[in-house]
Image (tube, grey):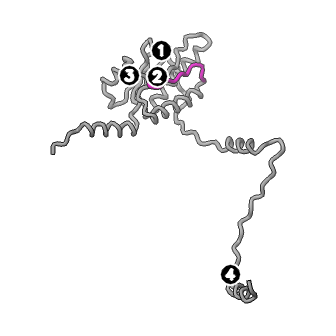
Amino acid sequence: MSADDDDLFRDEMAGVTPLQREQRVVRRPVSANKTALEHRRSAAVAEELPDRNKLTDTSIAPLDPWYVLSFKRPGVQNGVFRKLKQGRYEAQARLDLHRMTVERARREIFEFVEQSYQYGVRSALIIHGKGETRPERERASILKGCVDHWLRELDIVQAFHSALPQHGGTGAVYVLLRKSEEKKREAREQFAKGRVSLD
């Protein structure tokens, strides 16, 4: 640049004020005993996401091992519910709760039902146990009561009924889930293909 260019540049920039810089974050050195990966892991654990699970886990009464679970939402056809009770819908997904604590079972059921719905599963089998063995009697009967209570709380669940003996009897339950939006769309398209225009 020539001297004239320098003078011209200074004249043009005479009224300009420099931008204020934001303060920079000072990086703390990672301690010798903690690697960067461990640092990120501990930060991720500290920022836990809120629990979306709305299932209650208090004041749930245990049920008798031989009690038959049965529930149907309004709008579910009697014929559909009868087929469910008779085990005529093949279980497209299964969940076994044996040896789980109430808190773990609560998480598992919520995730299982939600994922089943997302994948378009309509019928599932949940095995909760009867609680007939002496050491586990109390815990298992509580799980059965919890399953009965939790499935009623989930709007996705349309109906459920204790299973037939070959599928676990009163230690398991058939669950009928609402049709996913994807499955509803597929059904509408299938129905539209079958319709013949009268024009």
Circle 4 residue: 16
Instruction: Specify the label residue 10 is tagged with.
Output: none
Q: Residue at x 69, y 83 (%)?
A: 13
Q: Is disc 3 surrounded by few (<14), some (14 to 19) or many (20+) residues within 10 Å? A: some
Q: CA distance from mark 1 to mark 4?
A: 81 Å
Circle 3 residue: 89
User: Can you name the residue that lies furthest to the front here?
Assistant: 2
Task: Name the amino acid type tagged 4.
Answer: Val
User: Can you name the residue that lies furthest to the left here?
Assistant: 199
Q: Is residue 31 above or below residue 184?
A: below
Instruction: Specify the label residue 125 is tagged with.
Output: 2
**Horizontal relation, residue 109 to residue 123: left or right:** right
What secondary structure is marked by label 4?
A: loop
Circle 1 residue: 168
Image x and y of residue 6, in percent: 73, 85
Q: Earlier in the sequence, mark 3 or mark 2?
A: 3
Task: Name the amino acid type tagged 2.
Answer: Leu
Q: Do residues under tags 2 and 1 come within 8 Å of each other at their CB atoms?
A: yes
Task: Name the amino acid type tagged 1.
Answer: Gly
Front disc: 3 or 1 = 3
Magenta part of the chain: 92-100
Front disc: 4 or 2 = 4
Q: Earlier in the sequence, mark 2 or mark 1?
A: 2
Image x and y of residue 52, in percent: 54, 39
Q: Do residues under tags 1 and 4 come within 8 Å of each other at their CB atoms?
A: no
Image x and y of residue 117, in percent: 45, 34
Q: CA distance from mark 4 to mark 2?
A: 73 Å
Q: Is residue 33 above or below residue 90?
A: below
Image x and y of residue 4, in percent: 73, 89
Is residue 179 located in the magenta-colored stretch of the structure?
A: no
Task: Name the amino acid type tagged 3.
Answer: Tyr
